[in-house]
Amino acid sequence: MKRISAILATLALSATPAAAQSDLLSSCTSAVPTDRDGNPVPVAVTNAVEEPFQFLCAQFVNSLTTVQPSVGIAFSGGNPVLGTGTTIGKRLGILPRVSVSARANVALADLPDLFRGGYSNELTALQPQLGTAPVVGVPVASVQGDVVIGLFDGISTGPMLSGVGSIDLLGSFSLLPKAEAVGLSESITNYGAGARIGILRQGLVTPGISVSAMYRVMNDIAFGSIEGGDPGEFSADLRTLSVRGVVSKGILALDLAVGAGYDRYTSDVSVGWLLDCKLLECETYQPGGAEIVGRFDGELTTSAWNVFGNVALDLLVLSIVGEIGYQKAVDGISVDDLEDAELPSSRHLTAKDLGGGRLFGSIGLRLTL
């Protein structure tokens, strides 16, 4: 019975993000076209712009689902304690040990190119449909500071087998500079806290093995600006639950660590988009054409798996560390999702398939006292 309950819980956890995205896509179909002042447009205009109006909305929802994990992994990186998988415990069994690190993170993300001025949201008699947004590779980078406090040494279960059940407290602060390439005009900050549980303490013979969980929150951010000439805009906060498992082993002056993790990202989002309509129906409504605006609020949840490896050069209490990893989102938007939401699906959302995978890396210093 317990096994069945665990399976059901896993299935529910994996299904929720897709359901949340379907809700956002459904909001595209129910959004009411208005003018810039918020007034509903005539039925003739609504009927003329219905498909491109919904299609543009879907492209911004798709952009959200790729921006969210890209920003999330740029904030956290892979290993919560750069360069090692072993807990640090206490000094002399009384005083907590402390480790601090500073790192620079970067994630190489493929994002729909909606914010750099190269995408046309104009409808004319010669072009009554919108094109798909091209995909652009964008580095998303952050600087991060981490602190680890050894709370409990754990227990020894045999010769050279120590640190079982040891506990470290984890804290993190990250800063993501503005990135005009993805429409991010202001820098954003992220705070996190969590714990790391030791399964085995690293020694001369034994590897260090640990699991950890961290919860991070980010202040509200805004991408794009309709007033600034973009075809749309969205704002979001970000709440991240990160789970990691790490194994490390020292070889001479090097520490090698490998690990895997799961991240669950949740945001309250506000989405707006604008069609520059110069069809006959729009010019009849407003001479020179009408600007048709749509807006809605909702919640977006995505998730991603990651794997990573670290190499650290130990210089007594100071370590110089590099990390490389790969993140794979597991709930991107597909043509089937469009059809389920009764959205236009005759074209892919982007000119190039967004597979949801991205490389990430870090370089930093760790000081352990």
Image (tube, rainbow, N blue to C red):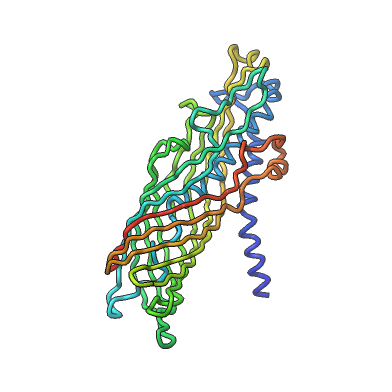
How many tags in the picture?
Answer: 0
257 or 266, which is in the foreground?
257
- Residue 10 in the image: x percent, y percent? 63, 64
Name which residue lies at 68% across and 28% down. 50
- Residue 155 in the image: x percent, y percent? 40, 83
Residue 282 versus residue 332 in the image, above or below: above
Side of 77 relative to 319 (left or right)? right
- Residue 52 in the image: x percent, y percent? 65, 29
Side of 33 relative to 109 (left or right)? right
Which residue extends farthest front?
A: 252
Name which residue lies at 30% across and 73% down. 96
32 or 13, which is in the foreground?
13
Residue 53 versus residue 278 in the image, above or below: below
- Residue 203 in the image: x percent, y percent? 38, 78
Determine the image quadrant of residue 102: bottom left
Name which residue lies at 66% across and 73% down. 3
Determine the image quadrant of residue 12: bottom right
290 or 168, which is in the foreground?
168
Q: Which image quarter is the C terminus in?
A: bottom left
Which residue extends farthest top?
A: 287
Which residue extends farthest bottom?
A: 158
Residue 266 versus residue 352 in the image, above or below: below
Name which residue lies at 51% across and 47% down. 68
Q: Which image quarter is the N terminus in?
A: bottom right
Side of 235 relative to 121 (left or right)? left
